[in-house]
Amino acid sequence: MLSKLWIAFLASALLLPLQSAFAQAFPAKVVRIVIPFSLGGSNDLTARILLPHLAERWKQQVIIEPHVGAASTVGATHVARSAPDGHAILFTSTQYAYAPSTFASLPYDPLNDLVPVTLVTVSPQMIIAHPSLPVNNPKQLVAFARSHPGQLSIGNAGNPLPTYSFIALAKVKMTTVPYKGAGPLQIDIMGGHVPLGMAAISSFMGTVKSGRAKVIGVCSLERTPLYPDAPPMAEAAPGFEAVAWFGMFVPRGTPPAVVKRIRDDIAEVVQIPDVRKRLNDIGGEPSGMPTEEFARMVRSEIEKWNKVAKAAGIKPQ
């Protein structure tokens, strides 16, 4: 009688050719990169930089397919319900980790219905201010906020959780102002209607370069090469970190060999010098993180923002 160990070995040996066949068969048709946000944003721009290189490697057409709505959950739901063959890929952002703390129920399970493939880019968030605000760095901002409790307001582009995290860790009182996107937030900062704003570096670079707003600090634990002159907000709010990340997911059940093929190709593409430069230009730092590591990161992010939401008394709607 064969031992259980020997049977397991034979099963693995038989699966190897099958997995190889899956990888060779992918892609067999058009690959759809599902974007859950409005076209023209960082998510869309990043995808368009990658598209021609992936199409060249895969010898198939690769298209962007927007499924917008409900804070990115419409797109995530669409991919979760797609065939698990790698031809529908969700390209989403940190909003994926915010969603479980924002919605009382989701039409998909973010930890089980989608497989994290790889982290594509990261972009630390940034706090900018109207030029008239008499602060120029994180410590000055926190000192000013403490001496004017409740008088400062800070706009957030999209989800407010990073703003709540900063307020808690800096131990200050501020009024949060929600915006549907970085565009309207920047307009109000430049117009002096709101003194502060927080969003991804990629969203604010143009405004800062124009001189119509100034940088207070970046929301990474250390200085970032994307904006090396900006000090970390953690200097005045120990432990504060809010990084906008962009990653790819496929439906649960997608063959591991296909997941590996997608991840490996993306990891190589983002390191092509021209691609890397273009991603840097829009405020993204290329990654290509291994699948297992990205899966751990996603789980950790969901847990982190859930704690922030509970501490801030936010009840999922």
Image: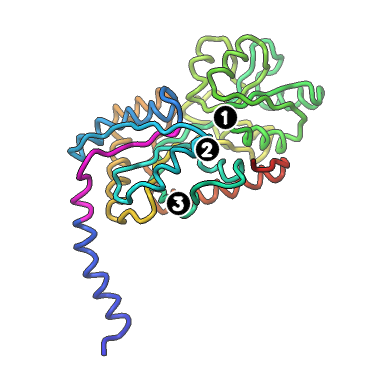
Please tell me whether residue 191 is drawn above or below residue 168 in the rendered image.
Answer: above
How far across and down, in percent of the image, does residue 185 sit?
A: 59, 19
Q: Is residue 124 magenta-colored?
A: no
Tell me the element at label 2: helix
Disc 2: CA contacts within 10 A as few (<14), some (14-19) or many (>=20):
some
The residue that label 2 is drawn on is 95
Q: Is residue 41 left or right of residue 7?
A: right
How far apart are labels 1 and 3 at the CA level?
23 Å
How far across and down, in percent of the image, does residue 107 sit?
A: 50, 47
Q: Quadrant of the C terminus?
A: top right
Quarter location, residue 216: top right
Amino acid type of disc 2?
Gln
Dot 1 or dot 3: first in sequence order is 1
Disc 1 versus disc 3: nearer the observer:
1
Amino acid type of disc 1?
Gly
The residue furthest bottom is 1
Mark seen at residue 158 = 1
In magenta, the rendered stretch is: 22-36
Quarter location, residue 255: bottom left
Is the Cβ of the residue at disc 1 closer than 8 Å to that at disc 2? yes
